[in-house]
Image (cartoon, grey):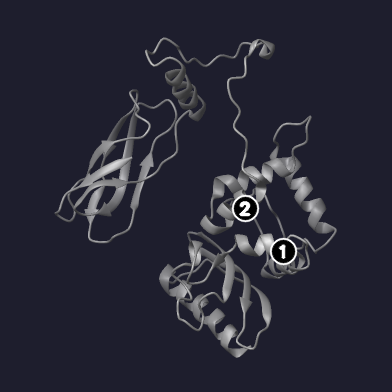
Amino acid sequence: MFLKSPDQIGSVCEVVRTDPVFSDIRFQSSVKAAASRKDSAYIFGYPGSTEWEVRGSIPASQSSFRIKGALPFPGIRLGEEVAALLSPGGKIDVKISSRPFNYDRLIKLTEIESPPVREIIQVVNQKSHNLLADHLFLAAGRTENTAYYWDVSRHHFEKFWEERLSLTPVRILDGSGLSPKNLVSADFMVGVLKFMYQSSNFDLFRSSLAVGGQSGTLVHMWKAPALQGKVMAKSGYMEGTLGYCGYIYTQKGDFLAFSVMVNQMTNDLPIVRQSIESYISDLIIRY
């Protein structure tokens, strides 16, 4: 969605357009122009509703400020785009049907091959891509003759790690970590990092992590010349919770695994993040 914000702070912003275009949904904006440079606007609605709302704030004086939201009925949207591609004149109707379909009648027009897992993991760990993380989790439990089931993937996860590490206390319900019912300890995460260090896939795994002061979610942390490039880690954040897990190169040449997690924090996020950054910086210099 692209929004236009006025110069005056606190004034309501205008929805310019959406990509893709929605002919069946009207978007009502209550987004305010703000002095900050942050994207704090969110799209609210549910599949089937014709009235959606956009709330929050975006920077003032923007002619076409882009935000993102979830697609209603993504399968239908894909069908409409394919139909438009095959019939620019709009002669193909896209409908939802529960009737059985004879797939032998289908004629393959094209095939889209997935990127290799190593490239997907690069995006997950560099950009904290939750959707891809969940799909990798689901795919890990799928076999040729089964569909995607959360319970099956959880079983595979538990079976794999209980043979290598203690799963007390560990409870994993998804691949992204977004479920508030997930439970994991810093000790378990360091165990995972140690396991990966000894794995034949370690170089690939390490290259997938964000690097302090250089890339991904850590590009604005550990930017000092003496610290830049010394931290390779994955960050994680939900309201009230912040964590960093990964590796550090110390000034003495040691290579250490670390995991820092803060739960139910009462201080502001920037202050907590700065505290973690200072703590890891001290480890780099001290060891």
Residue 227, above or below 139: below
Residue 101 position within the rendered picture, expressed as x and y whole percent measured from the top left: 64, 12
Residue 268 makes an appearance in the image: no
Residue 150, above or below 201: above
At label 1, the amino acid type is Phe
Which residue lies most toward the left here? 8
Identify the residue under disc 1. 202
Q: Which is more N-terminal, label 1 or label 2?
A: 2
Disc 2 + disc 1, Cβ < 8 Å? no
Residue 249 position within the rendered picture, expressed as x and y whole percent measured from the top left: 62, 79
At label 2, the amino acid type is Ile
Which residue lies most toward the front here? 110
Q: Quadrant for residue 147, please give it.
A: top right
Q: Quadrant of the C terminus?
A: bottom right
- Residue 121: mark in rendering: 2
Q: At 78% across and 36% down in the image, what residue appears?
A: 143
What kind of element bears circle 1?
Answer: helix
Distance, label 2 to label 1, CA atoms, is 13 Å
Count of marks placed on residues: 2
Residue 266 position within the rendered picture, expressed as x and y whole percent measured from the top left: 46, 70
User: Which residue occupies the foreground of this view, 268 or 115?
Assistant: 115
Residue 6 position within the rendered picture, expressed as x and y whole percent measured from the top left: 16, 49
Q: Quadrant of the N terminus?
A: top left
Q: Residues within 10 Å of mark 2 (few under 14, many from 20)?
A: many
